[in-house]
Image: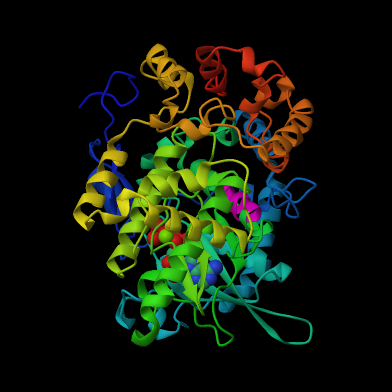
């Protein structure tokens, strides 16, 4: 197969989507058998040789979070380096103190009760399959959980809500001072598995990973995934999108708010949602519209593309959708974010079509999500989507059969989406297309600098001025550095950095130049 990174290569889906498994590389190298089996549920994840606990006890009060509560990635790596390069053995009393800590924490052993689980939550297992915490959790993970119990983040850890290839999610309770109970969910990433290697495409081009991607070190990689999930959850949660509240992170263990009822039953995945037949039609279509709004907010407000969105990674309760599993979510300026977005649109659209929902064309949804300016809050989002349906009703596409619409979708899915200048196949031709006023034909038209492609509407003038203000404080070279900690400020400032290339004389700039500027790669 030709490389998809070559601009002359035809666009090919880089991976196939498997239910509950995310994207699988379609071509890929064989995974050694031993590693494959290590990821299978029934095989204990305990890593016999992995008894190095230094990083767990090192600076016990340090959760790896910066002063603002964000995981401080660069600090963690810096901290790890001297640890590994320093040949000096730790003094004996360090070991003693670790031993002391282990035995002190082990008093919490009885509070990890993995067999205490609500039966319906063990979707794929029966009782005989369940294992003790020693079998399921390696020592490092147990120590982290004991530490969390010691600090009161959780008081007890119960059985698995879900056991998967990459992570297990456990139910937990925390007792407040007044003995009231709060449920929590604890996601434990597996450090022994190798499906993570398949995740490389999410990392390449992700500026937040620059400092840390080290494919040779599983434990470190998995820690990064957990950190990434934590950061993404923070972003999504603080944008007011329904998702678990991120609470604590230590290495590969993440504690979050529990999405479930007061009795400790987790909400079902959207796939398993139990919607009464008499209200099914209306509910499914309202949920579809709700999801499109969420996707747009994720993109516009959080600057994220979920990148594994499907009925398996959305929980459902009482007409509300909850977004989960965001460790692989990418920044909207990730070189492949639009490809991932297109897959998210396809996968969720397929699911809603199966429920009988009259979905919008993938391309319409794509444009709705990525077009800057406009609504990012409800009820405006819902109204904007209703407008899209109305526009479709007035146009010829409304008469299309389902099969014809599917053809349109397929055409869109095969189209090549350039996201950086380097990826544009024929820049002169595209510029010419724009020059002829046919920029609308380009898949990436809505990413082009404002209104070179689309005619400028009078009320959009205002938002452009807003943006130029922000742009002014935004063009420092520091942003291109490896600093991980500037991540959140970048996202809160809004417009993509490409905007800074805009200037007051923009109308004089030729279409080609404009295209060049707009698509100038942000990652060098
Ligand atoms: N905060 C939560 N509250 C309740 N249930 C949750 C929560 N987070 C996850 N779950 C349950 O755990 C399941 C797995 O979670 P998640 O999708 O985050 O893991 P995963 O990365 O898909 O793991 P794997 O890929 O190994 O299956 C979810 O489908 C959901 O049922
Ligand atoms: Mg999942």
Q: Who is closer to the viewer here, 196 or 454?
A: 454
Residue 53 image point, x, y percent: 59, 51
**186 in magenta:** no
Vertically, is 69 above or below 220?
below
Q: Residue at x 65, y 39 (%)?
A: 73
Question: What residue is at 27 percent from the left and 22 percent from the top?
Answer: 9
Direction from residue 334 to residue 497 in the image, left or right:
right
* Magenta residue check for 227: yes
Q: Residue at x 71, y 86 (%)?
A: 180
Q: Identify which residue, 135 or 126, lies in the foreground.
A: 126
Evaluate whether residue 511 shows in this view: yes
Split into 4 quadrants, where in the image is the C terminus? top right
Give the color scheme: rainbow, by chain, secondary structure or one colour.
rainbow
Looking at the image, is 360 positioned above or below residue 329?
below
Counting from the top left corner in percent of width and height, residue 191 is at 45, 50
The outermost residue toward the front is 394
Near-viewer residue (127 or 167): 167
Magenta-tinted stretch:
226-235
- Which corner quadrant holds the N terminus? top left
**Image point (39%, 51%), residue name:** 345
Corner quadrant of residue 278: bottom left
Measured as percent of width and height from the top left, residue 454 is found at: 52, 32
Question: Number of marks in the image?
Answer: 0
Q: Quadrant of ligand 2?
A: bottom left
């Amino acid at each position: 197969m030709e490389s998809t990174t070559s601009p002359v290569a035809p666009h090919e889906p880089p991976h196939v989507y498997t239910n509950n498994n995310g994207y699988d590389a379609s071509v890929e190298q064989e995974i050694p058998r031993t590693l494959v089996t290590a990821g299978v549920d029934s095989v204990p994840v305990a890593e016999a040789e992995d008894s190095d606990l230094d990083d767990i006890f090192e600076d016990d009060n340090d959760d790896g979070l910066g002063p603002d509560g964000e995981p401080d990635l660069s600090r963690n790596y810096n901290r790890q380096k001297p640890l590994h390069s320093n040949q000096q053995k730790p003094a004996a009393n360090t070991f003693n103190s670790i031993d002391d800590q282990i035995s002190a924490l082990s008093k919490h052993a009885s509070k990890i009760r993995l067999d205490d689980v609500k039966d319906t939550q063990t979707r794929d297992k029966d009782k005989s399959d369940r294992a003790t915490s020693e079998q399921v959790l390696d020592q490092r993970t147990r120590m982290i959980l004991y530490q969390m119990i010691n600090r009161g983040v959780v008081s007890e850890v119960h059985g698995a809500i879900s056991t998967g290839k990459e992570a297990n999610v456990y139910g937990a309770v925390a007792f407040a001072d007044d003995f009231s109970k709060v449920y929590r969910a604890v996601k434990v990433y597996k450090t022994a598995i190798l499906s993570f290697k398949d995740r490389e495409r999410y990392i390449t081009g992700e500026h937040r990973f620059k400092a840390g991607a080290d494919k040779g070190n599983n434990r470190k990689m998995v820690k990064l995934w957990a950190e990434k999930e934590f950061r993404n959850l923070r972003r999504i949660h603080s944008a007011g999108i329904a998702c678990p509240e991120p609470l604590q992170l230590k290495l590969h263990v993440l504690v979050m708010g529990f999405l479930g009822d007061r009795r400790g039953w987790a909400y079902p995945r959207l796939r398993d949602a139990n919607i009464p037949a008499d209200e099914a039609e209306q509910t499914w279509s309202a949920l579809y519209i709700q999801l499109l709004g969420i996707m747009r907010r994720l993109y516009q407000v959080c600057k994220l593309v979920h990148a594994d969105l499907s009925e398996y990674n959305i929980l459902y309760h009482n007409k509300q959708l909850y977004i989960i599993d965001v460790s692989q979510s990418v920044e909207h300026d990730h070189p492949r974010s639009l490809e991932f977005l297109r897959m998210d649109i396809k996968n969720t659209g397929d699911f809603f079509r199966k429920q009988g929902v009259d979905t919008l064309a993938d391309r319409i949804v794509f444009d709705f999500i990525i077009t800057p300016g406009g609504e990012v809050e409800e009820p405006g989002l819902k109204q904007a989507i209703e407008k899209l349906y109305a526009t479709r009703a007035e146009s010829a596409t409304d008469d299309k059969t389902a099969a014809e619409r599917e053809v349109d979708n397929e055409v869109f899915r095969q189209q090549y989406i350039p996201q950086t200048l380097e990826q544009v196949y024929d820049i002169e031709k595209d510029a010419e297309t724009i020059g002829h006023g046919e920029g609308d034909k380009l898949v990436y038209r809505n990413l082009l600098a404002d209104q070179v492609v689309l005619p400028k509407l009078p009320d959009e003038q205002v938002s452009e001025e807003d943006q130029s203000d922000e742009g002014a404080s935004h063009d420092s070279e520091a942003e291109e550095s490896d600093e991980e900690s500037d991540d959140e400020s970048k996202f809160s400032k809004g417009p993509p950095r490409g905007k800074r290339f805009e200037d007051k004389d923009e109308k004089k700039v030729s279409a080609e130049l404009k295209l060049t500027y707009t698509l100038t790669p942000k990652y060098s």
